[in-house]
Amino acid sequence: MKKLFIGCIAVIAVLMGLAGCDSERTTYEGPNYLMFSDTLYRYAVQETGEVFNVPVSATVPVDYDRTFAVEVVDSISDAVEGKHYKLLSNTVTIKAGECAANVQVQGIYDNIGINDYLTVGLRLIIPKEEQWSLYGIDSKVVLQKACPFDINSFTGYCKVTSTFFNDYMQNVTMRLIKTEVNPEKENSVILHDLYYKGYDIVLDFDRKNLLEPLVNMEEQVCGNTSEAFGTIYGDGNLLMYQPTMYTSYYSSCENFVLQYVTIYVDGVGTVGTYVNILEWISDAEAEKLKEQGY
């Protein structure tokens, strides 16, 4: 993916063979080229209907407005115009004295599926002499649905399945637990009795990037070695943390969390790395599970 710093100056060379420590600033003084500022963009489509700006840049400013067409390239698109998105204008104008403008795209929230990863291929219609072969004239815009986030959707009854159960809780296939909002931290919940009764776990939801809905967890005690292994190891505490080498995430569209955890005993060693799947369910669904013995 190329990255251009939008502006009227484009650095295209490094001065070589400079005498002593002196150097001069090198600026672009070549032909005028037009291009998308990047070859790929990802946008989170929300129900609030935000308009996304796809930047276009020029290598040099001129003293007149430059208006040119933008077309959708079907061969590199799987999003459908008018169904999944709107192209708000088929033209873009870089005003006199400026080097940047935006093509505007608006996603249609209701028509994008939870797991859709839809691409809009865009192309600038410009004269051949204004096309820079180094960068081309195309760009892709990827649209992904981002459902509204409500921390309360991750409270109440929760189904827990874990690969840890297979190794050390062999008579357990699923646990039904209760969760509540953490009163001491924003966007955080308390998972009561996650693995073992009496051992609660705090789980945090990262809201910085809508396209990367991650969960985080500090190291915590999740049980004791007597209950897990039938004997005491180390200080008796079974510790859990979230390894950074794997991605743990949540879905606000489907109200679930997929989390990797590593379990170890301090001073003894690592038990293993496991996958937890947490699924929040309704009270009615929970009552049915209770009737089945969960």
Image (cartoon, rainbow, N blue to C red):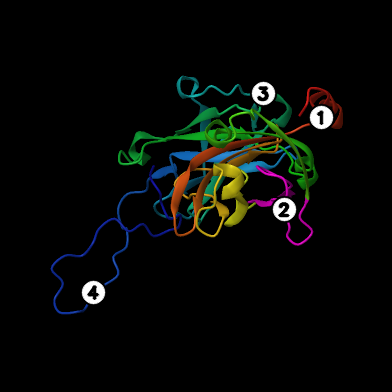
Can you give x and y, in whole percent of width and height, for residue 39 in the image? Answer: 43, 39
Query: How busy is the neighbourhood of tag 2: few (under 14 within 10 Å), some, or many (20 plus)?
Result: some
Alpha-carbon distance for marks 3 and 1? 41 Å
Residue linked to disc 2: 187
Position of residue 85 in the picture relative to residue 10 (left or right): right
Sequence-first tag of 3 and 4: 4
Circle 1/circle 2 CB separation < 8 Å: no
Secondary structure mainly formed by the magenta segment: loop
Query: Residue 288 vs residue 7: left or right?
Result: right
Task: Read off the residue under disc 1.
Answer: 286
SS at circle 3: loop
Residue 5, percent from left and from top: 43, 55
Q: Secondary structure at mark 2?
A: loop
Q: Where does label 3 land, which residue?
A: 82
Highlighted magenta segment, given as a residue range: 181-206
Residue matched to label 4: 23
Disc 1 versus disc 2: distance between alpha carbons?
24 Å
| Of the image marks 4 and 1, the number of the one nearer the N terminus | 4
Residue at figure coordinates x 45%, y 59% from the top left: 267
Q: Nearer the viewer, mark 4 or mark 1?
A: 1
Residue situated in front as seen by the camera: 82 or 89: 82
Q: Are discs 3 and 1 less than 8 Å apart at CB?
A: no
